[in-house]
Amino acid sequence: MNATAVKTANHKQIDVAAYMREKGQRARAAARLVARADTGAKNGCLFSLAQILIDEKRAILAANAEDMRLGRTNKLDAALLDRLELNEARIEAMADGVRQVAALPDPVGEMTDMKLRPSGIQVGRMRVPLGVVGIIYESRPNVTADAASLCLKSGNAAILRGGSEAMQSNQAIARCIARALRDAGLPEDAVQILDITDRRTVGELVAMPEFVDVVIPRGGKGLVAAVSNGARVPVIKHLDGVCHVYIDAEADLDKATAIAVNAKTQRYGTCNTMETLLVDAAVAQQALDRIAPIYREAGVELRGCERTRRILPDARPATEDDWREEYLAPILAIRVVDGFDEALDHIALYSSAHTDAIVTENYTKARRFLREVDSSSVMVNASTRFADGYEYGLGAEIGISTDKFHARGPVGLEGLTSQKWVVLGDGNVR
Amino acid sequence: MNATAVKTANHKQIDVAAYMREKGQRARAAARLVARADTGAKNGCLFSLAQILIDEKRAILAANAEDMRLGRTNKLDAALLDRLELNEARIEAMADGVRQVAALPDPVGEMTDMKLRPSGIQVGRMRVPLGVVGIIYESRPNVTADAASLCLKSGNAAILRGGSEAMQSNQAIARCIARALRDAGLPEDAVQILDITDRRTVGELVAMPEFVDVVIPRGGKGLVAAVSNGARVPVIKHLDGVCHVYIDAEADLDKATAIAVNAKTQRYGTCNTMETLLVDAAVAQQALDRIAPIYREAGVELRGCERTRRILPDARPATEDDWREEYLAPILAIRVVDGFDEALDHIALYSSAHTDAIVTENYTKARRFLREVDSSSVMVNASTRFADGYEYGLGAEIGISTDKFHARGPVGLEGLTSQKWVVLGDGNVR
């Protein structure tokens, strides 16, 4: 066995680069066909997939049981095993998700802004698929059906690379997808699920700009960093979520309390959870006296600047590192600031540009906050927890982008499309 | 002098990486201020710049004369010297260009699609600057004023890296820009023009994602390839323009003739010039009998497939390479195809996805062409020469993208912006 040969799920020896290039070529060819597929064919395929997933429940559960058995042998931790595990309810939820994507409006083919120009040409834009989308994810097998549906609905071919621990489950779902594509008369290569999980597949996937138009890593920071590093194709990246709530001097303290509590405690592990609370000095005593007991009751550890600790002596001293930390845990950093501009300066310096919110009744400060805070989601009098594709009405979320290029914040189906120019003439020349 | 030290225009020794990082840091700081600058301040600065360019005409011409003298000493070719040369008319045109950018609508701050969600939040998007834009260009000094204006109008900070041969001219224009920024109360670092032209500046510029949000190379294929290669920031790339016109069996031959002639002969050196003419076999004899004499008269060398050469025996045989070639010259490849699908197959295989056009009176084929041809501009009964920011009504063109991500085709001010999410609430929590 030479250096680049690995075993597939079927224990054949193969060359990773050649394997990936073949996947790429097939995806590129299929992309042309799926781009022009009409909405009826795509939705038909998705509804059929939902049904096949239900019909093949037992086969999928058997495959998943194999993964779970191997996972236990390999001593995977409990959280990972939980993400990996499928059961009847989870398969039904997977099928429901596929049906929900079918129900979304088709973004492809929409023509907008068809202006008639002085030259006589009519020019505007048509929304089109990006082409080939690579998705790299970890243990949850439901992402396989989810990602396949989103790519197909947006007219893209997909190359999916799931985690090694979910290999059998993913292959079982892959067989359902292949059947649904075949039944709908769509090319099977429109969705290819890798049957090897060699780490080099990721490196190859992001190094084939001729075959792959964008790669989306769905997983933790480590995965995102590994995928982005040295990528030669665009990557929709989701990095840190160091989110802020700023309680302004003119905040309604009922709203401030509700938002500060919700943004921190509704869920601790999500990227849109508040990690730092900023409070204007003018209302710091009042606000913190009201909010801190609720945090304490919820078991949230408080870390504060010096002025915070004068109000909340039980808070641990916050260090410089605390302002930069995405805790993803029941810990909150609190800083008292002297007014609006100091709050904005703090956010400009420490925010990861994910989601930041102000609580204020002042119209002008609300408008300034919306304009001047350069984050993917900027909010007035609302909890940062709303930064989410479903809450924003996108119907589905492919990922959240912390980049500025192409798409920012929650990315829906539209993020898997681009716009080309269309020109209608009548024999016009320059 | 150590390995990374080079001389600036003022003959100081410096470290390129440190020099570029300092520019990056200054740009990042200025970007925050210029992003929030109101339209009045930005336009005021641009109108003032236009006036300063006129007022400083003599200083600019003197600097340009130095560049020209050095260029002649270094035996630059005549075309390059022509691009480099400034005169009164060219400076007036430069000032006019700046005023035109001032007259464009400000893309920044526009809020769209503010939907009221069932949760009670109102959510939509606000158009925002990308942040820091790097522009790399060659000999024309007018690009300095042009690029600076476009970046400033779209609320971005700019780092401009011109050609070494235009160093003195660019520095003279840079002084005008700095004065205009100062006069308008905008940060001078909003537009920084490098005063060294060491090749490594390009490598550094595309390797600082922490300071630079996008880089746009404005120049030939060599420059674009050099800039894109290994870039760690997004690059708006403009590569080949292998553009097609397909004369369908149901084409109006008057329109076909006008378009085929215009698309090839109006200008030979532009990216939107047709390089391959496809003709349906059903009308090949008729169409080519009409069009070929016009090409011959214009001095266009014809290269054809076998069937073309049966109709035009004087055409040279086209090889496989001809279908892939961007001639940028009075040469045209011609291929006779059997119907619409063969034309689409040819375009899918050989087009550089820049601009492709069909000439037809058939409604269904027109619609299919628009949908199925995956190029940045797709046209019906219009000359490929229309693929241009000004013709499309963008007001200005920052570049043309042959990529699919973020922007395709002619890129206007909007291409230097992104959209963030804004959420308006009333104390809403999840």
Image (cartoon, coloured by chain):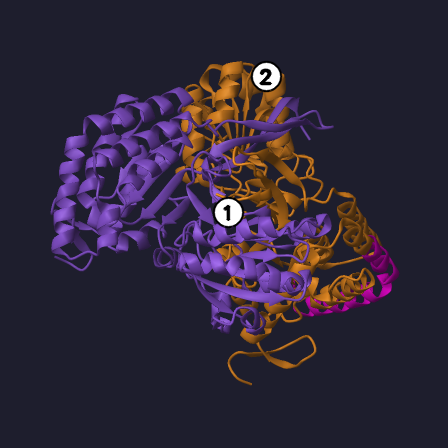
Chain colours: A purple, B orange
Kind of residue at badge 1: Gly
Q: Is residue A263 above or below residue A103?
A: below
Q: Residue furthest right?
A: B55
Span colored in magenta: B47-76
**Chain designation of label 1:** A
Q: Is residue A271 magenta?
A: no
Q: Residue at x 14, y 42 (%)?
A: A65
**Position of residue A132 measured from the top left corner of the image (x, y, whole percent):** 38, 39
Residue assigned mark 2: B253
Q: Is residue A107 above or below residue B162?
A: above
Residues tagged 1 and 2 counted as in contact (Cβ below 8 A): no
Question: Which marked residue is nearer to the observer: mark 1 or mark 2?
Answer: 1
Q: Is residue B68 magenta?
A: yes
Residue assigned mark 1: A409
**Position of residue A78 measured from the top left corner of the image (x, y, whole percent):** 22, 54
Q: Residue at x 53, y 49 (%)?
A: A258
Q: Residues within 10 Å of mark 2 (few under 14, many from 20)?
A: many
**Position of residue B100 measured from the top left corner of the image (x, y, whole percent):** 78, 45
